[in-house]
Image: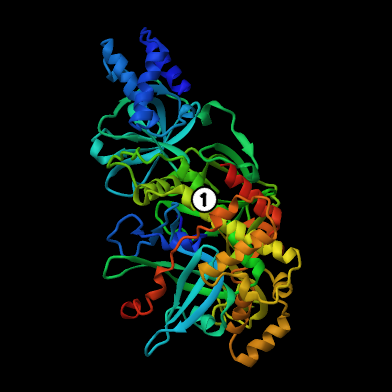
Amino acid sequence: MRKLVDQISARLKEQKIEEPDSEIEAQLKKLIDDFRVPESEAKRSVLNHFLKKHGIPLARTKSQKVKIAEITDPGIWVDLEAKVIDLWEPQNETISQTGLVGDGTGAISFVKWSKAALPNVEIGKSYFLKNVVTDAFQGRFSIKLHSRSQIEPLDHEIKTQTETAVMQEMKIAEISEPGKWINLKAKVVQLWDSNSETISQAGLVGDETGSIRFVKWTKADLPELEEGMSYLFRNVITDEFQGRFSIKLNKNSQIEELKEEIEIGTQSVEFNGTFVDIQKGSGLIKRCPVCKRSLAKGICGEHGKVDGIYDLRIKAVLDDGRRVQDILVNRDATEKLVGISLEEAKQMAMEALDHEVVRSLIETKLMGRYFIVVGPRVDRYIMVETINDSLPVKVNEIDDLMSLIEVD
Amino acid sequence: MAGFLREVARRIFAEELRNSNLAFRDGDDLNQYAPQYLLTPTGARCNRVFLVGTLTERDDIGGDTEYWRGRVIDPTGGILVYAGQYQPEAAQALTNIEPPAFVAVVGKPNLYQTEDGSVIISVRAEAIQKVDDSTRNRWILETAKRTYERLEALKNISLASPEFSTADKPIAVSPAIDAERALAHYKTDTMHYKQMVLRALSSLRADIGNDNAKFSSKDVTIEVPRTPETGHLKVKSESTGKSRSKSTKGASLDSWPEAEADDDVETFHIGKKS
C-alpha cells in the first residue's frame, strides 16, 4: 500500500500536483479493501481521479516511456523506442505481425494484432511505439500493439544491446535466462529434420559444459551447419520453453567455423520421481552393429536390414507431480535395477517367444515406484548413471511439513 | 517446434478428486482432439493422475468383454478405478492383484454425470502396479506437499478480482489462472483442504510411528482404513495410545468427512462404456 501511495504521489508531483498521502491512501484503501479492485487497477483509477481534479488530460499519463529492461509487470501501458530485430511468421490471422524489438537494455517480443490496423514495421528500422501494453506469459514479458497504439518511425537509430555491448561469450551451462544475446563456441552434436519451412536447421549443439537445442531460421540466411563441426556463434539469442533453454540463430547472428574442436562435456543432474511409463523400446532390444541405433523389426533406419546385437535398456518417463522427465537406462544399470542379466533376458524372451516379456518384467518391478536418478542431461533425456530407490519416509519429514502447514 | 508433451501425472487425494466436477478441453472446445482436463477444487489441472493406495475390492463388471473396476483407498477416502479392453495391461494387472494390496495407479480422470445430475469422478487406468508400503507412504507425503503448494497458490488470489480479459489476449496457461478458475467455480474452502492434508499426514505419521516402534504388524489390513469408520477408529486409538504431543489434533481427526456416497453406483458405468 505504501509503495502504491508513493508511486501515485510521485506521478502527481511530475504534474506539479500536491495531494496529501492520507488522501491518496484513503482512496486506494476504499478500492482495494472495500471493493476488491486489483492493485494495478486501483492505482490507475486513483491517479486518474486526482489528475482529473486538476484538469490534466488523461491521455498524457496513460502510458509512460520505458526501456525494455524496465518492463517488470504485465498489463502496463508503456511507450517504447525500439528497433525491430526480427519478424516471425504469425501463427494465426488475428496477428498481423510478430517478432522481436530491442533497445540498449534488452529485447522483447511483440505482437501486432490485425484488428489494430497499424502500419507494418520493417526489420532493422527504429520506431516509437506508443501506448502499447505489456503482457506476461509463463514469466516472460511481451508487448501487444492494438488499436489504441501508435507506431511512429524514428529519424535516429536505436542501438540494440547487441550493437552497444560487447557480446558476452557464454558457456552452455551458464545460460539461465531467455532473451539474452550471447556468443557461443560449440560443436553441432545432432541435426534434426526440420518440420517447418521457417526453420532452416535445428538440432543440438554442445560445449564442455553441456548441450542445448538450437534453431536456425530460414530467414536468417545463414550458412549450413554440419554435424560434428565446431563453430563460433555470434549474436544468438537465448530462449526458453517449459524450463528448457534453447538458442535461436536469426538475421543478426553470424556463424564462424572454428579450427579447434570443442570437447563436449556434460553436467550431471538429479531427478526424483516415480515411473509413470515404461516405453516401447525398453527391455530386450537389438541394435545395429554399425551405428548402434536400435532396430525396428530388424531394420536399421540408416543401414537397412542388419544382423542386430542384443542389448538391454530402459526408456521410461519419471514424474514428480510437477514435471515429467524422460530417462534412458543402459544395460549395466538395467541389469542391476531389475535383477536380470542380458543372458537371462534372452532366455526369457526365447521361452516366451516374445521380447515384450522383458518389458513387462521391468514394468512390474518399476512402475509407480519412487527413484532418484543421476546422470547427464542430453536433450530431453537424462542418461542415467546411477539410480536408487527413494528412501522410506521419515517421521521428521512428516513433522516438518505438518508444522509448516499448521503455522500457515 | 514444441512437439508432443506428455501430461504430468498430478497428485491429488481421493477426497479432493471426488469433489471435482469441472472438466474442460484445452483451448478450442470444439476440437475433439484437444486434451481434456479436470480442474480440482485446489486448482490442479489434471489430464493424468498418479495415485497410490489400498486396493480393497475389484470386480469384473463387464458383460461379454471384461471390464474391471477396483476401489482404491487413500487416507482421505476412496476412488473407483476402471480398466477395460482398451487398457489391456491395466486390466490384466487388476485381474492378478488379490485385494487388499497397495497399488500404484497411473490414469486419466473421468467425469461422469448421472441422470439426477450428480457427478462421479473415476480414474481410467493406464497402468496399475502392486507396490510396497514405502511407496504408499512416499505418495502420501508427496501428495500432501503438492496439495499444500496448490493451497498456497489459492491464497494469493482474491476471488473478487476476475481478471478482465481482452479478446486479444490468448488463453494463458498458468497455475495462477487455474487457481483463479478453481476459486471462482468451487468457492474453495481452503481451510477444509488444509485440514484434509493434515489428517492425511497425521494418519501417515501414526502408521510410520507404528513401524518404528516395532509394534506387531501381524495384520496388514488393519494398517489401512478400508472404510472411513475403521480408519478413524484406528487413528483415534493410536493417538490416545501414543499420546502424541499435538493433542489438539484429536478433535479434527474425529471429523472425517462423510463422503462414501459412491458406494451405490455399482452399475452406472456399464451402459456408457467408452
Expressed as whole percent of the image width and height from the top left, the position of residue A219 reads 42, 45
Is A83 in front, or is A256? A83
Expressed as whole percent of the image width and height from the top left, the position of residue A234 reads 57, 39
Type of residue at label 1?
Lys
Where residue B216 sits, quadrant-wise, is: bottom right
Under circle 1, the secondary element is helix
The residue pinned by badge 1 equals B194
Does residue A295 lie above or below B75 as drawn? below
Residue drawn 71% across the image and 58% down it = A394
Is A217 in front, or is B10? B10
Question: Would you say residue A323 is visible in this rendering?
Answer: no
**The N terminus of chain A lies in quadrant:** top left
Expressed as whole percent of the image width and height from the top left, the position of residue A198 reads 40, 51
Where residue B96 sits, quadrant-wise, is: bottom right
User: Please, which chain is the residue tagged with disc 1 on?
Assistant: B
Mark 1 surroundings: few (<14), some (14-19) or many (≥20) residues within 10 A = some
Is A17 in front, or is A292? A17
Give left or right: position of A2 versus B224: left
Residue drawn 36% across the image and 60% down it = B21
Residue drawn 38% across the image and 17% down it = A24
